[in-house]
């Protein structure tokens, strides 16, 4: 076994063949590295684009949330004043107006947020 290996390594054709293989591997490495760098640049550009889109969407969502909260608060105050001033309003209704359940308002806000997210996902 060692004799076969020694004969293959001392053969006069081994040197040029090894040199050709080394050159081919170096060329393949250069081509692959170039391809990988181009692909990495494309991914980085896409990441920057998506980050900017996310920041814009976040700003939009925050503005919509602030507008919804302001409109909701104004609407609730107007309704509470109107119902409390209504003649013959039962005491239970006044108590419910003063201590409104949070679940209904939270559901409306979540549905609004869902609509805003889905509207941005449309192409």
Image: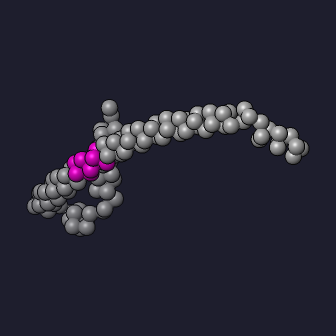
Q: Which residue is drawn at 28% across and 44% down?
A: 53
- Residue 122 x, y percent position in the rendering: 33, 34
User: On the rendered image, what quadrant is the C terminus found in?
Assistant: top left
Q: Give the range drawn in magenta.
A: 50-60
Q: Nearer the viewer, residue 42 or 91?
A: 42
Residue 102's quadrant in the figure? bottom left
Instruction: Determine whether, in the image, residue 108 is placed left or right of residue 83.
Output: right
Point 24% across, 47% down: residue: 56
Q: Does the magenta stretch include residue 10?
A: no
Q: Can residue 67 be seen in this view?
A: yes
Coordinates of residue 37 in the picture (x, y in percent): 43, 41
Above or below — where is 100 with respect to 18?
below
Residue at left 46%, top 36%? 35
Pick out the residue farthest to the front: 12
Main SS of the magenta part reads: helix
Q: Position of residue 36 (x, y in %)?
A: 47, 40
Who's the residue at 53% across and 35% down the image? 27
* Residue 91 seen in the current view: no
Left or right: 15 as drawn, with respect to 110:
right
């Amino acid at each position: 076994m060692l004799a076969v290996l020694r004969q293959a390594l001392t053969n006069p054709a081994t040197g040029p063949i090894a040199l050709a293989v080394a050159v081919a591997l170096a060329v393949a490495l250069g081509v692959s590295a170039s391809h990988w760098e181009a692909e990495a640049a494309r991914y980085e550009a896409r990441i920057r684009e998506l980050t900017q889109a996310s920041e814009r969407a976040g700003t939009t969502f925050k503005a919509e949330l602030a507008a919804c909260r302001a409109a909701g608060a104004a609407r609730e105050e107007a309704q509470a004043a109107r119902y409390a001033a209504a003649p013959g309003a039962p005491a239970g209704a006044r108590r419910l107006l003063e201590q409104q359940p949070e679940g209904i308002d939270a559901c409306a806000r979540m549905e609004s947020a869902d609509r805003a997210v889905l509207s941005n996902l449309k192409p």
